[in-house]
Amino acid sequence: MTEAAIFVIFPLCLAFAAFSDLFTMTIPNRVSAILLGAFVLVAPLAGLGIAAIGVHLAAGVIVFFSCFALFALNIMGGGDAKLLTASAVWFGFSTPLFEFLIYVSIFGGLLTLLILALRSYENTILASGFRVPHLLFTAKKVPYGIAIALGGFVAYPSSPLMQAALAQSH
């Protein structure tokens, strides 16, 4: 049961956040709350000790303060900051966390370029009948939850929790 939770909860929350951000330009607070709450419940069951759980939570705190600074400078949205923080807890302070953050940066840059291209060809895209969420053209921001989700999908298999789940399932 623990392995199933590890395999499903994190990716499902990220997918929900990405679709929500794409279509509404918001990431519901409950997604980040579910990620944090599920980690606290699943981590001990997966065999992480108190010290390891503390390191995971410390990683979240460090990412939170970095994201808060970006939010205060109006560089990052609040939903993105909360989702990135809650996701970081699942990685802990480890190499996979840095991989995750690098992937998020890469996907975020590509996503930003794609959104800018879409916005510059808005009339052509709309005339072609291709369905694109209207907020992508009208909002002044980028749905960065998509980049966070993609980075999470790529980096998650190497995360400590996923590695523990894989080891227990064999």
Image: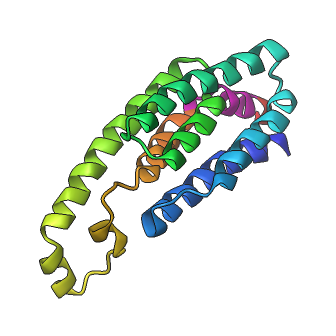
Q: Position of residue 130 (x, y in %)?
A: 26, 81
125 relative to 115, above or below: below
**Residue 163 within the segment the image draws in magenta:** yes
Which residue extends farthest front?
72
Query: Is 115 left or right of 124, judged from the image as shown?
Result: right
Query: Is 41 left or right of 161, judged from the image as shown?
Result: right
Query: Is 19 left or right of 169, judged from the image as shown?
Result: left
141 relative to 41, above or below: below
Q: Position of residue 68 (x, y in %)?
A: 51, 32
Kindly report the secondary structure that dominates the magenta region of the rendered protein.
helix
Q: Residue at x 77, y 46 (%)?
A: 5
Q: Position of residue 80 (x, y in %)?
A: 49, 45
27 relative to 50, above or below: below
Q: How is the image coloured?
A: rainbow
Q: Residue at x 45, y 62 (%)?
A: 25
Q: Residue at x 77, y 47 (%)?
A: 4
Q: Position of residue 1 (x, y in %)?
A: 86, 46
**Picture mark count:** 0
Q: Residue at x 76, y 21 (%)?
A: 53
Query: Is 63 left or right of 89, judged from the image as shown?
Result: left
Snapshot quadrant of residue 17: bottom right
Q: Nearer the viewer, residue 38 or 25?
A: 25
Q: The C terminus lies in which quarter of the figure? A: top right
Q: Nearer the viewer, residue 62 or 114?
A: 62
The range drawn in magenta is: 158-167
Q: Nearer the viewer, residue 139 or 10?
A: 139
**Residue 19 within the segment the image draws in magenta:** no
